Image (cartoon, helix red, strand yellow):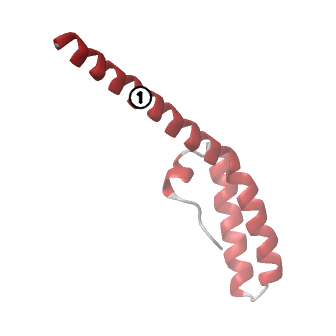
Amino acid sequence: MRHCSVQVRGLLTREELDRYNALMEVGSFLESQSRHDLAYTVQKEVDWLIMPAIERLKEKSRARDRADEEYLRGLAGEEDEDD
């Protein structure tokens, strides 16, 4: 089973995280029993479950980029005033 990143896990809600942990446990058990066909199905469910957290991470990145852009524009404006 493939785990999601720590950043994505940190953005899961409590309910999503509980479900994620349960699915990972089931998937690990299935893999230990060489039931990779069923583990694949569980992995697909995990992939679907983490999609909202991935979108939250992307939005945080976009917000940070916007803040950086505003900051840099502010610096450029200050330099123009100094001239």
Towards the viewer: 82 or 49: 82
Q: Is residue 33 above or below residue 54?
A: below
Residue at 65%, 53% in the rendered image: 18
Residue at 72%, 53% in the rendered image: 49
**For this view, does 77 lie left or right of residue 83?**
right
**For this view, does 17 lie left or right of residue 60?**
right
Q: Is residue 81 above or below residue 45?
A: above
Q: Is residue 43 above or below residue 58?
A: below
Location of the N terminus by quadrant is: bottom right
The x, y position of residue 70, in whole percent, is: 40, 23
**For this view, does 21 lie left or right of residue 35?**
left
Which residue, as the protein is rendered here, is positioned at the far left?
A: 82
Splitting the image into 4 quarters, where does residue 83 fall? top left
The x, y position of residue 64, in whole percent, is: 45, 34
Towards the viewer: 62 or 74: 74
The x, y position of residue 24, in whole percent, is: 66, 67
Splitting the image into 4 quarters, where does residue 20 fall? bottom right
Disc 1 element: helix
The x, y position of residue 50, in whole percent, is: 67, 52
Residue at 64%, 43% in the rendered image: 55
Say how many tags the image has: 1
Which residue, as the protein is rendered here, is positioned at the far bottom?
A: 34
Residue at 78%, 74% in the rendered image: 40
Q: Of the residues shown, which amino acid type is indicated by label 1?
A: Glu
Towards the viewer: 61 or 26: 61
**Which residue position holds label 1?**
69
Which residue, as the protein is rendered here, is positioned at the far top?
A: 81
Query: Tag 1: Cα neighbours inside 10 Å, few (<14), some, or many (≥20)?
Result: few
